[in-house]
Amino acid sequence: MTVKINGKEYPLKYSLRALFVYEKLTGHNGFEVNCTEDSFRMMYAMVKGGSRDCDLTWDDFIDACDADPTIATTIGAELTKQVAEANALGSAKDDGGAKKK
């Protein structure tokens, strides 16, 4: 999935790279949301984590979200989806992939 910001398409990815970006931005150890700013920093981290070549600054990201609120809606929905997929994958690995009866 991609999101268009300031006329440029950015891939969105909930990944180790995104988590590292998030931790660096917030100083948190792991993904925890304590305020609205944390939510937006995670969304920004997904944009940065989606491409090594991402040159979008935090201020440009926030300005774009202010100008077009659908950016945050789109990224938030994708974040929810990708976190759920990652959790489901982790659960399947934890139980050896066995289906419960």
Image (cartoon, grey):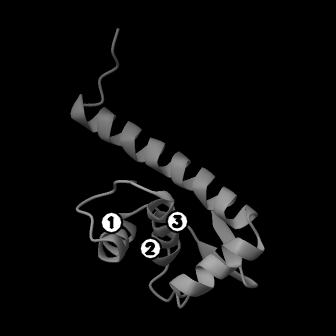
Q: Which residue is mark 3?
A: 40
Disc 1 vs disc 3: which is toward the camera? Answer: 3
Residue 73 sits in quarter: bottom right
Q: Name the one closer to the observer, 16 or 73.
A: 73
From what the image shows, is residue 52 above or below residue 31?
below
Mark 1 Cα within 10 Å, few/some/many (few <14, many 20+)? few
Mark 2 Cα within 10 Å, few/some/many (few <14, many 20+)? many
**Measured Cα–Cα span from mark 3 to mark 2:** 14 Å
Residue at point 22% right, 62% down? 29
Q: Is residue 4 left or right of residue 87?
A: right
Position of residue 71 measured from the top left corner of the image (x, y, whole percent): 69, 66
> In what quadrant of the picture does the N terminus appear?
bottom right
Taking the view exactly as shown, the residue that stands out farthest to the top is: 101
Q: Is residue 51 left or right of residue 95?
A: right
Q: Which residue is mark 1?
A: 16
Disc 3 vs disc 2: which is toward the camera? Answer: 3
Residue 33 sits in quarter: bottom left
**Measured Cα–Cα span from mark 1 to mark 3:** 17 Å
Q: Name the one closer to the observer, 68 or 8.
A: 68
Query: Which of the two discs, 1 and 2, labels the residue nearer the N terminus?
Result: 1
Position of residue 100 measured from the top left corner of the image (x, y, whole percent): 33, 15
Q: Amino acid at mark 1?
A: Leu
Residue at point 46% right, 42% down? 84
Residue at point 30% right, 76% down? 24
> In what quadrant of the picture does the C terminus appear?
top left
Q: Are marks 1 and 2 in contact (CB under 8 Å)?
A: yes
Q: Is residue 93 left or right of residue 8?
A: left
Q: Which residue is mark 2?
A: 49
